[in-house]
């Protein structure tokens, strides 16, 4: 007996909710692909990231040496 190959479940288009097509996966059409691309290029989609402290902030945190430490 041949093994049964299960296909992946199809998900709806993330833009309009219609069933996705193989030619435009995971979207249903070229129009929805273009809408998604435009959202990425215009900055509508943002990947959250943790900001690194800037050099100015680090300099403010380092205590300045006192004048008493410089005397012999």
Image (cartoon, rainbow, N blue to C red):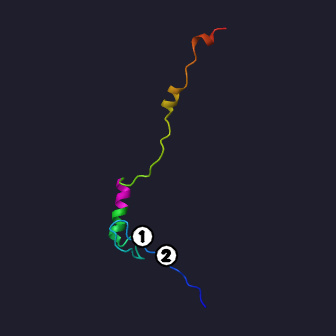
Q: How many labels does the image show?
A: 2
Where is residue 71 shown, x and y percent of the image?
63, 9
Where is residue 9 shown, x and y percent of the image?
46, 75
Q: Quadrant of residue 63?
A: top right
Assign the magenta stretch its main secondary structure. Answer: helix
The residue segment tinted magenta is 37-42
Q: Is residue 43 above or below residue 62?
A: below
Tell me which residue sits at (32%, 68%) in the image. 16
- Tell me, for residue 26, which label it has, or none: 1
Question: Which of the pair 56/8 is nearer the observer?
Answer: 8
Tell me which residue sits at (41%, 52%) in the image. 46
Q: How crowded is mark 1: few (under 14 residues within 10 Å), some or many (20 or more)?
A: some
Tell me which residue sits at (48%, 44%) in the image. 50
Secondary structure of the residue carrying tag 1 is loop
The residue pinned by badge 2 equals 8
- 52 sits to left or right of 24: right
Foreground: disc 1 or disc 2: 2
Tell me which residue sits at (59%, 85%) in the image. 3
- 72 sits to left or right of 38: right
């Amino acid at each position: 007996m041949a093994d049964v190959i299960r296909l992946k479940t199809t998900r709806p288009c993330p833009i309009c909710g219609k069933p996705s097509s193989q030619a435009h996966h995971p979207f249903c059409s070229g129009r929805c692909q273009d809408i998604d691309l435009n959202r990425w290029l215009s900055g509508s989609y943002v990947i959250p990231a943790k900001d690194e402290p800037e050099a100015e902030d680090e300099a403010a945190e380092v205590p300045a040496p006192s004048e008493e430490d410089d005397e012999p």
